Amino acid sequence: MTEVLVEHHWEPPLTDADMDSMIGSTAGCFGMHRVDRNSSLLSADGRELFCHFTAPDAESVRIALHQACAPRGEVWSGTVHDAPGLTDDGLAQANILVSRRFDASVAFEEIQALDDVGSSRFLTHRARRMRTYFSTNRRRMVCLYHAPDAESVRIALREARMPVERVWAFRQFRS
């Protein structure tokens, strides 16, 4: 099975009721295409949605979303890297998403080394990286953090001189 990630931007913003309805309406199509939804992360303003699926391949997710009449957004496959000792309870505490895009392919270890060098910055701002999703083309990365707020993560990233595209707070919708 493959880890598949989907990013959506919504106008107008989604509500919790919209999320519950969407999750319920896609279940049949997902089952037919052997797509398992692991989690969906909705931004605090309801405009950004990041979803993690396990499926035979990314195309299965695209087809299932299309058949469920759900906009598919940006779909990519990748790998999942958890912080050492992370439990499901620990992952449930994640509340900040950081996205990164790279002009050229990078090695996961390169970015991990930057994270390690800047680790004191994250400790100072009480931000802990919980999980990283890294694209198979090595040009996209999404990291989940647990922190007091998005600004704490932004400051730590800036001080550590780490590349960043966007940072936003979210609430989780888990399977």
Image (cartoon, rainbow, N blue to C red):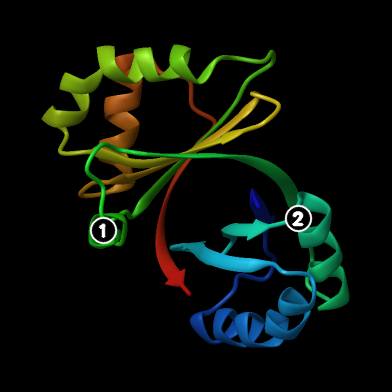
Looking at the picture, which amino acid does disc 2 mark? Gly
Between 16 and 87, the one lying in front of the other is 87
Question: Would you say 140 lies left or right of 69 here?
Answer: left
The residue pinned by badge 2 equals 73
Q: Residue at x 79, y 70 (%)?
A: 33
Which badge, 1 or 2, is on the more N-terminal residue?
2
Does 114 appear above or below 166?
above
Residue 130 position by quadrant: top left
Residue 123 position by quadrant: top left
Q: Residue at x 75, y 55 (%)?
A: 73
Between 16 and 69, the one lying in front of the other is 69
Residue 160 x, y percent position in the rendering: 30, 16
The residue pinned by badge 1 equals 93
Q: Give the total of numbered labels.
A: 2
Question: Would you say 49 lies left or right of 33 here?
Answer: left
Density class for disc 1 (Cα within 10 Å; few <14, some 14-19, many ≥20) is: some
Does 22 appear above or below 47?
below
